[in-house]
Amino acid sequence: MNTVVLTEPGDASRQMVTLARKFGEPLHAVPMNAVEPFAPDALAAILQGVADELNASAVLAAGTERGNEVMARLAARSGLPFAANCVAVTPGSPVTLTRLRWGGSLLEEARLHSARPLITVAPHTVPVEAGTEPVDVDVKRFVDGLDERDLAVRVSDHVAPGSGGVSLTTAKVIVSGGRGVGSKEGFAIIEELAGLLGAAVGCSRAVTSAGWRPHSDQVGQTGTKVAPEVYIACGISGATQHMAGLKGAKRIVAINSDPQAPLMLNADYTVAGDLKEILPAISAEIRNGR
Amino acid sequence: MRVLVAIKRVPITGGRIVLTEDSRAIDTRHLGFTMSPHEECGVEEAVRIIEAGGGDSVVITLGPPEALEQLRDAMALGIDRAIHLQTDGLEWDAEATASTLLDAIRAEEAASGRFDIIFFGNESADSGGFQVGARVAHALGRPCVTGLKRVVIEGSSVRCEQEVEGGRDVYIVPLPAVLTVKEGLNLPRYPSVPGKMRARNKPVAVTTPARPAPRLELVSLSVPAGQGRRAESLGSGAAAAPAVVELLRKAGVL
């Protein structure tokens, strides 16, 4: 049995490889950088060529943005179904699998009816197990055989991120505000505390929809997924949309006037009361301790 | 310029998801609905493109009769008319969704001309399949760029910026193109009262396509076990500040 995997650097790819072994070894790897600059249709064409030649039993990739993007294109050109962001699979006819919905707020049990299952594995859901590593396919022949049309969509330039501020994805501490902050100006006390902690400022979707903060500050299913040591959620109710972005947070501190808010029930630590009193008091306490 | 936007009706889930008795769907009896967030930005972008350069815009959805509400919302923001591929409420898998949208797009283009841009959300909020846009683009033989946070029309091509780690990747593709977008592309406007009034009289073409057997077949849904967080109270009001600072010290971030 041959299984084809689309590999890239990082844990998500190793986790995917662990699941891919279930479909039969050896594993044949097409690296994400087989075509540079990145050209998703070209990668899909290479995967299709390799899978056809090896009569592969399945093709898998990590459920990263690029992994899902390339696999969707492979599915389109092969006319096969594609299951994104799986967390468990059992090969068979049909394949039975579990996949994430709602950014991980729901699990779906499903059957995949396909002669060649196309699957991505949701990052950080499967533990890495030791085993035979995939062997890189000699892709040169496939690259040389690419059609011009498969290179029409390719990266032609890169724009650096906006400067200033601590990045949400790498921050050790995030101070985040929700509707309870009340206004754009209300974020001054959040920024003050964040400044003292060297923290990034985050917010909920309600805040960006109201235009109080830019979307780049938004934490959640359709914003940024974060993994800080401490996440301080101020005046955020804790809708599933927001919680989907917090799964990687080590400790969650919720500050809210409503003790029954979902985030107060799903936090590690809670402070009940008015954030307009609590946040300045925390900032003052930090200053006093210096 | 002709622009099409595909949208999906999804429930507003709030704080806790409750499933139906057969565990095959979300219990939506007490929930409101919206269009999937990424697609809301697709609608806004389409309206801005037509406002800036003229032309016409169409919104399309595959969904139950109630999805008319989301089509009207899109038209209240400025979309000219709607195509409603009506279902009986059963979910369609991504492959079937793409194929029936494709049929409708081909019919619409044969009647009224080619779309220069077709917008999709990068992934739907609920089923998160990440593939309908790519499938439609491939079948139409048009370039597809995904995950976009910025779209700029430059003559007969479009400059697309895709968010990646450490900045944005830029793609420039010729029109016509299929673009899948993400929330943050723009800040969608609120519908105006006159906009809502006008939307009531804008045309909606309804058809009822047959649902093929899904090849990615939903069996059941479940709510994942909690992450084991057990809320410990640090007190209330300003008096809790020392306890919060102590916690930050212990966590090694202060």
Image (cartoon, rainbow, N blue to C red):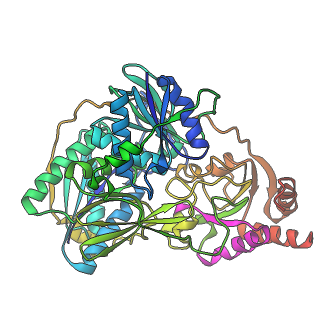
Percent coordinates x, y for residue A172 in the rendering = 73, 58
Main SS class of the magenta portion in the image: helix
Which residue is farthest right? A289
Instruction: Residue B195 in the image: state x and y as whole percent.
Output: 27, 73
Vertical placement of residue B27 versus B193, above or below: above
Given residues A99 and B12, the one toward you in this image is A99
Q: Is residue A105 left or right of residue B11?
A: right
Position of the C terminus of chain B, as image quadrant, is bottom right
Q: Nearer the viewer, residue A179 or A105?
A: A105
* Residue A181, position as x, y percentages in the image: 63, 69
**Above or below: residue A47 compared with residue A173:** above
Pick out the residue farthest to the left: B111
Of A24 and A235, the residue lying toward us: A24
Looking at the image, which residue sits at the far top?
A: A92
User: Residue at (29%, 36%) from the top-left corner?
Assistant: B90
Where residue A207 sits, quadrant-wise, is bottom right
Q: Is residue A164 above or below residue A69?
A: below
Q: Quadrant of the N terminus of chain B?
A: bottom left
Q: Residue at x 37, y 22 (%)?
A: A94
| Residue B193 visible somewhere in the drawing | no
Which of the two residues, A102 or B54, is positioned nearer the viewer here?
Answer: B54
Query: Which residue is painted at 42% across and 42% down in the image?
Result: A139
> Does the magenta run of residues contain A203?
yes
A134 within the magenta span: no
> What is the quadrant of residue B171 in the picture?
bottom left
- Stretch of the chain drawn in magenta: A184-205
Examine the rendering and report whether any part of residue B99 can be seen: yes
Q: Quadrant of residue A160?
A: bottom right
User: Picture coordinates of residue A93 (x, y %)?
Assistant: 37, 19
> What residue appears at the point 73 percent right and 69 percent down from the top-left corner?
A194
